[in-house]
């Protein structure tokens, strides 16, 4: 959807949309990543080290499939891990055009260090949750994400709320992009127009706060919607320096069509959840999005997000 902000505001009209909730939950984890991850620590490295546990040797291609990253990303991660002495990288005997990776003792030690701090991360992104709430959220996320996970995804990643949120969000965004394409809008546009219809004419800054995006991302979204003819910037008569966003007459019809498509896709993605479980998942995600940030219990928190997000 765009660069995230640390806003905790959640507009009621958006709070009931699973697509928006998963984007906001994913964005919250991404914001935490940017705040705590030191230079030189890659977000994909820990997942790769986990997938190489037990002394196995794996090709880069199979490793990329297991941890759900692109081949290009895997090439970079493998090179970085090899340079740090965390994996041994040799030509794959089954395909001399590719490499096979084996985790070194140093890599195993690094994986253990990072894993120790995983509980601190869960505390950070589930502020105010009881242990029962956290386990329920993890169980619901895994039920939804299971179909999109490789069979050999390491257990620590299957148990990670941040990783599971990322996987579900990635699938939802990909499939929402496809179903909304005939309407010439994207998921971020659907959210922005839904918020604008609910709020009435507002400034870009206010809309950005309610969407949970940065000011720069909001400018891009508004530019695209204005080019599409779905909104218009107008200057206030009382303050010519301030621009207010107004939806155009076509918006209700576009939103109605988008909502029908989104509902059908939501039913498909969450089809294995009962109505009661879906309602519970929505409620838990609302709490995750709106909960205030917490300070880590451990100064090593900067390492722990490595174990939770493996984006495509």
Image (cartoon, rainbow, N blue to C red):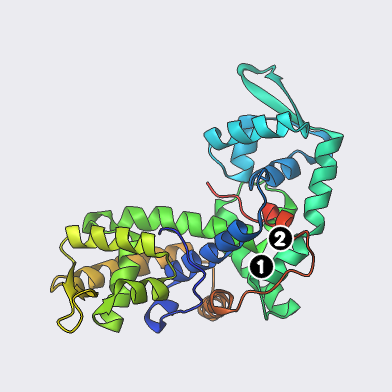
Give the left or right position of residue 43, taking residue 200 as reference: right
Q: Earlier in the sequence, mark 2 or mark 1?
A: 1
Q: Determine which of the numbered discs, if any, sits on residue 159 in the image.
A: 2
The image shows residue 39 at horizontal and vertical percentages of: 65, 46
Residue 4 appears left or right of 143: left
Kindly identify which numbered label has been placed on residue 267.
none
Residue 195: quadrant of the picture: bottom left
Kindly indicate the quadrant of the structure image that contains residue 293. Answer: bottom right
| The label number, if any, that marks residue 138 in the structure image | 1
Count residues near mark 1 (Cα–Cα under 10 Å), then give few for <14, some for 14-19, many for 20+.
Answer: some
Q: Position of residue 157 (x, y in %)?
A: 69, 54
Residues at discs 2 and 1 in contact (Cβ within 8 Å): yes
Residue 219 against residue 86 in the figure, above or below: below
Q: Is residue 175 left or right of residue 200?
A: right
For the point 80% across and 41% down, the residue is: 53
Q: Is residue 18 depicted above or below 199 in this figure? A: above
Q: Position of residue 56 (x, y in %)?
A: 79, 33
Q: Secondary structure at mark 2?
A: loop
Of residues 9 and 53, the one nearer the viewer is: 9
**Inter-mark Cα distance, 2 to 1:** 7 Å
- Please tell me which residue is depicted at 74% across the width and 61% down the height of the picture: 301
Q: Nearer the viewer, residue 19 or 302?
A: 302
Question: Label 2 neighbourhood size at 10 Å, few (<14), some (14-19), many (20+)?
Answer: some
| Camera-side residue of 198 and 297 | 297
Q: Position of residue 186 (x, y in %)?
A: 31, 58
SS under mark 1: helix
Q: Quadrant of the N terminus?
A: bottom left
């Amino acid at each position: 959807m765009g660069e995230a902000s640390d806003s905790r505001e959640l507009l009621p009209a958006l709070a009931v949309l699973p697509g928006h909730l998963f984007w906001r939950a994913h964005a919250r984890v991404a914001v935490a990543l940017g705040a705590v991850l030191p230079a030189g620590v890659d977000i994909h490295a820990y997942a790769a080290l986990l997938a190489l546990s037990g002394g196995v040797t794996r090709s880069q291609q199979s490793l990329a499939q297991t941890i759900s990253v692109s081949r290009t990303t895997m090439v970079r991660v493998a090179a970085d891990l090899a340079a740090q002495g965390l994996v041994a990288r040799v030509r794959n005997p089954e395909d001399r055009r590719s490499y096979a990776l084996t985790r070194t003792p140093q890599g195993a030690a690094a994986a253990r260090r990072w894993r120790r701090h995983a509980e601190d991360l869960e505390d950070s992104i589930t502020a105010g949750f009881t242990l029962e709430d956290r386990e329920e959220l993890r169980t619901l996320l895994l039920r939804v994400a299971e179909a999109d996970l490789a069979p050999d995804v390491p257990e620590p990643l299957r148990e990670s709320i941040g990783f599971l949120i990322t996987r579900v969000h990635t699938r939802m965004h990909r499939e929402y992009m496809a179903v909304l394409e005939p309407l010439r809008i994207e998921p971020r546009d659907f959210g922005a127009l839904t918020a604008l219809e609910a709020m009435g004419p507002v400034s870009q800054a206010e809309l950005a706060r309610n969407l949970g995006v940065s000011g720069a991302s909001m400018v891009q979204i508004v530019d695209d919607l204005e080019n599409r003819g779905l909104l218009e910037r107008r200057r206030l008569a009382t303050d010519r320096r301030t621009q207010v966003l107004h939806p155009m007459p076509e918006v209700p019809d576009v939103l109605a069509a988008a909502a029908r498509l989104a509902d059908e896709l939501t039913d498909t993605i969450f089809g294995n959840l009962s109505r009661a479980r879906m309602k519970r998942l929505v409620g838990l995600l609302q709490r995750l999005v709106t909960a205030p940030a917490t300070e880590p219990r451990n100064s090593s928190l900067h390492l722990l997000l490595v174990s939770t997000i493996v984006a495509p």
